[in-house]
Image (cartoon, rainbow, N blue to C red):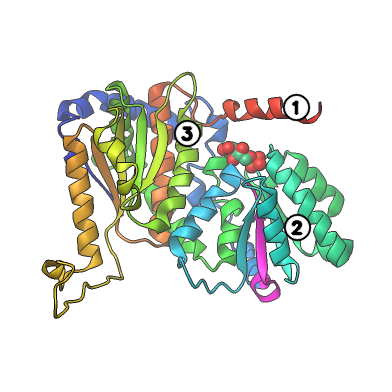
Amino acid sequence: MLTINTEFLNQAVKAHEYIQLAPYAKLAHHQLVTGEGVGSDFHGWIRLPETIDLEEVADIKQRAEDIQQQFDAFVCIGIGGSYLGHKAILEALQPAVGKEEKTEILFTAHNLSSRYLDEVMTYLADKNYCINVIAKEGIALETAVTFRILRAELERRFGKEGARERIIVTTDKYRGPLKDIVAEQGYPMYHLPHEVGGRFSVFTPVGLLPLAVAGIDIDALLAGAKQMMTVCESDDIEANPSLKYAITRNIMTQKGKEIELFVNYEPYMVFFSEWLKQLFGESDGKDGKGLFPASALYSTDLHSLGQWVQEGRRNLFETVLSVNDKPVDVPVPSLEEDLDNLGFLAGSSLNHIQASIKQASMVAHSDGGVPNLEIAIAKLDEFHLGGLMYFFMMSVSIGGYMAGVNPFDQNGVDQYKSEMMKILKG
Ligand code: PA5
């Protein structure tokens, strides 16, 4: 389902380093699966692919069908973990141009740009739509304010009763302001298990409802996560890739690397990197520790960041995400005349050229002092994305425990919120 290629790490990481660090990774793994590690009240995601309430999944699929039949658009209101997971999967699986969704999925509250929200609202003005407000217990101000604005607009257009038929809430089972609003207004509500943190919540109704509305096969997504969960039960480094990856990142940190650059070659995976940036940034970056997660899309960024990667400060390494099976290929045509001097590529194809660029970049960057490893999945589909996401959740948790941090809190995120409230309340 997933392979790790360490060929271009060879100069930077020695085999004995894996052997020396294996016991630490195994201990972290043990603390994770037994619930002995710090932050274990947020371990709910670990067995989720197996323990998920199948009746709720069936209910989500039914509601998604109803929404597809009834509404032109489905507006997600959420930020951070209440936005990035399902956005990443949608971007990965939907066509870049010419989408044919029965119900269009729109995203709001991931920014507070007036221009953006005004555009969305103008676009929705003659559409029949519903909204899904999504928040872990905290509810970010971005989400709360956007919900207030869109709820008021729904009530203005459709009346209180009409608005009630167009609002779905996804939030923590026991806590948070949205729960109180639901109790008051009677909106339908899906539960986010209390033991699952925001950035680990894509396999809960947070991600599953929007994805099902978009026609994504959520059963296959969960099946992929479940298969990776089984793989990650092993504490053998050769059998469990999340251990190997966590050790590699730990070695990179010890060798002075400060930045992990997630590299993609498919534009469809740009938002997957955004999801990774939250997962790793919020889980790792605390107590004065952690790699800074950054991302690049190659070839695009080979013509911008590429210079820095090749010859700038030597404080980064690259994690290249690859998809082996490419169902589409575009051939390079042969022409009678060879005015562009590309005759040597006639009969070749874009996939072949892109693979050559990838190989060349990995060699050049590695030779230039930027070690890189490659994580590859067989196909870009629901099953493999589910497995890949679970793999990264497991890796960041093991790595966090190895570094001695609690990967499941995010007190630093809350810091700016209290400052903001002071400013807003005067
Ligand atoms: O990982 C987390 O829990 C957080 O980063 C949240 O995803 C983010 O702050 C959004 O919060 P909420 O979903 O409560 O609005």
First to last magenta residue range: 66-78
**Residue under circle 3?**
281
Location of the N terminus by quadrant is bottom left
User: Depth check: 270 or 286 in front?
Assistant: 270
Secondary structure category for the residue under label 1: helix
Which quarter of the figure has residue 404?
top left
Secondary structure category for the residue under label 2: loop
Answer few, some or many: residues within 10 Å of disc 3's Cα (few below 14, many 20 plus, some between 14 and 19).
Answer: some
Answer yes or no: is residue 338 visible: yes
Q: Contact (CB < 8 A) between labels 3 and 2?
A: no
Question: Can residue 398 be found in the magenta stretch?
Answer: no
Q: How many marks?
A: 3
- Front of the two marks 1 and 2: 1
Image quarter for ligand 1 = top right
The x and y percentages for residue 129 are: 72, 67
**Residue under circle 1?**
423
Q: Contact (CB < 8 A) between labels 3 and 1?
A: no
The residue sitting at 19% across, 30% down in the picture is 12
User: Depth check: 317 or 42 in front?
Assistant: 317
Q: Point out which mark residue 188 bears.
A: 2
Above or below 192: residue 348: below
Q: Earlier in the sequence, mark 1 or mark 2?
A: 2
- The residues bearing labels 3 and 1 have C-alpha atoms spaced at a distance of 26 Å
Answer few, some or many: residues within 10 Å of disc 2's Cα (few below 14, many 20 plus, some between 14 and 19).
Answer: some
The amino acid type, in three-letter code, at marker 2 is Pro
Q: Earlier in the sequence, mark 3 or mark 1?
A: 3
- Front of the two marks 3 and 2: 3
The x and y percentages for residue 59 are: 64, 63
User: Depth check: 117 or 241 in front?
Assistant: 117
